[in-house]
Amino acid sequence: MLRMLVSRLGQGVIVVVLVTLFVFLTTFLTGDPAGLMLGEGATQEQIQAFRQRMGFDRPLVTQYGSFLVRAVRGDLGVSLYFQQSNMQLFAERLPATLQLAFLSLALGTALAIPAGLIAGARRNTWIDSLVTNAALVGQAAPVFWVGSLAIMVFAVMLGWLPASGRGTPAHLVLPTLTLALFPLAYNTRLIRSSTLEVLGQDYVRTARAKGLPYYVVLFKHVLRNAIGPALTVIGIQLGTFVGGSVITETVFAWPGVGRLAIQAILTKDFPLLQTIVAFLAVGFVLVNVLVDVAYSLVDPRVRY
Amino acid sequence: MGITSTVPAAGRRRGGARRLLRHKSGLVGLVVLLLLIVFSASIGLFTSTDPAAISLTSRLKPPMTTAGGAYHLLGTDALGRDVLVRMAYGARISLVIAFSAVAISLAIGVLIGLLAGYYGGWLDSLLMRVTDAQLAFPFILLALTVLAALGSGLPQLILVLGIGRWDVFARVVRGEVRSLMQRQQIEACRALGVGDWRVMAKHLLPNVLNTVLVVASFSVATNILTESALSFLGLGVDPSIPTWGSMLAEGRDYMRTGWWLTALPGAAIMVTVLAINSIGDWLRDALDPRQAD
């Protein structure tokens, strides 16, 4: 177990370096952010001074190296646009993002498990085709459209719920439902197909043959074995889920990291973007390690 | 999900043709996609309406109304432009970007997958690390970063989606090639001194094409979703060209007075993605039954 953790974290460091390096190089293709930040009226001297202050006049490798060194020490620089510590900006926005992400993921998965299990157990019945088709539609519907429709119907037309912002529990309803759609649709299909696989196994037949009630077999034997493979894929799908939360936060003006990232991109605030990217990559690596650990807890046959 | 079919190989092959016709949703998907292609390509024949023609007297007309001497099946937007015509032009953009990007991903991914699966070694490990890094980061943020840095436009979008998504093809092809390499046929070729490239082109490539086709069809759908999201966020093609994503973004300002501006472009995206995904399921069932559930 410990060896697995160490090797996974080691690989994770490589991934984080690759991702941040990529964004670092890309953002420098725009050329110098100095001219962009200071505007048209800036004199040559002002630009020079700014570049020196920000370190933009040094070679790229040096800049990336010092970025890494400072990052490890916990100093991630100052946002060009907000004129605030990047770290502080990120930390301020993180709780909102985590709240929305956890709620949506929990809701989506909580509904997906029974839906997928029932669809798999009742294969080729009307309930299976209902669940499967609903999941297909859910996966094909663009997140920004679902969110916009939700705002239009429930906030603008009916006036039941707030359209944007964060504060009361009512503010959570529409963004959570919107963001939950993807994990719901995706996990339903996943749990259904792994349920089908498990149902064909000998131990399920044995359990049925020795007279255990159907629902006991379904929840004790089938569910426990079907959830393992689903877990791994949930880890892999995390990137898509984070992409979905970026869009959801933008649609609902949710004050989270995703919206901050879009703001950073649109204002070419690359130091801020770099910070967000680094944290997201680290978060992704950690979640995937956690998924592996959870897998071995759910399925005792898996030992590291 | 790794389900092995219990149908013997011969039976599977004989069932193929019947399965093709029995797959109703696949047929429906194909018809929808073909209609969309034909309609968007020939929109100029049906109507001379310019998608950019502004008519302030016929602003925000709901679907199925006549205004300013023209019938608007899907209504008009805040500048009096015909929504149906704009959506047809938007379809062109979405389809051109999605299919061209898949062609690029396919070419890069199949080549790298073949090489990694055939030679193994450092190339293989490098590929796997790069794939990990790609998985580690929401693609849409990477795409946004690149587009913000390079500027956005049709070629940039095609390149970003094409270069950003080759890893799916590479992984699938690598896996297939690795298992094909165990076969005696390949071993025999190599023992007889057939060149590496010839083995890859004549013996490996034809065997992975079915899988590649299935992956390609799902990739087209993913690209349509990503492209529309990028347009929605304001980093799509030139704002003067209508796209489904940018139409939806503009429509959000008129939710109270023009529901169709929000509802219709998104519905078009969903129907297109559904159609292409059904074609993908269809191809998978027919060409690659091991992957079907």
Image: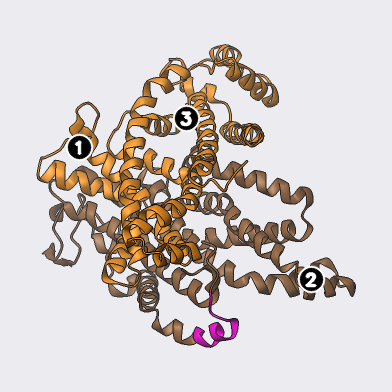
Chain colours: A orange, B brown
Q: What residue did someone put label 2 on?
A: B199
The residue mark sitting in front, 3 or 1, is: 1
Q: What residue did someone put label 3 on?
A: A268
- What stretch of residues is rendered in magenta? B6-16
Q: Secondary structure at mark 3?
A: loop
Name which residue lies at 37% across and 48% down: A183
Q: What residue did someone put label 1 on?
A: A163
Q: Main secondary structure of the magenta part?
A: helix
In the rendered view, tell whether residue A155 sits above or below residue A120. Answer: above
Q: Toward the viewer: A133 or B146?
A: A133
Q: Is residue B269 visible?
A: no
Q: Secondary structure at mark 1?
A: loop
Between the C-alphas of marks 2 and 3, the distance is 48 Å
Residue B86 among magenta residues: no
Q: Secondary structure at mark 2?
A: helix
Residue, far front = A210
Q: Position of residue A187 (x, y in %)?
A: 39, 53
Label 3 vs 1, first from the N-terminus: 1
How packed mark 3 is, by other alpha carbons closer than 10 Å (few <14, some 14-19, many 20 or more), is: many
| Chain assignment, label 2 | B
Left or right position of B108 against A166: right
Q: Toward the viewer: B162 or A292?
A: A292
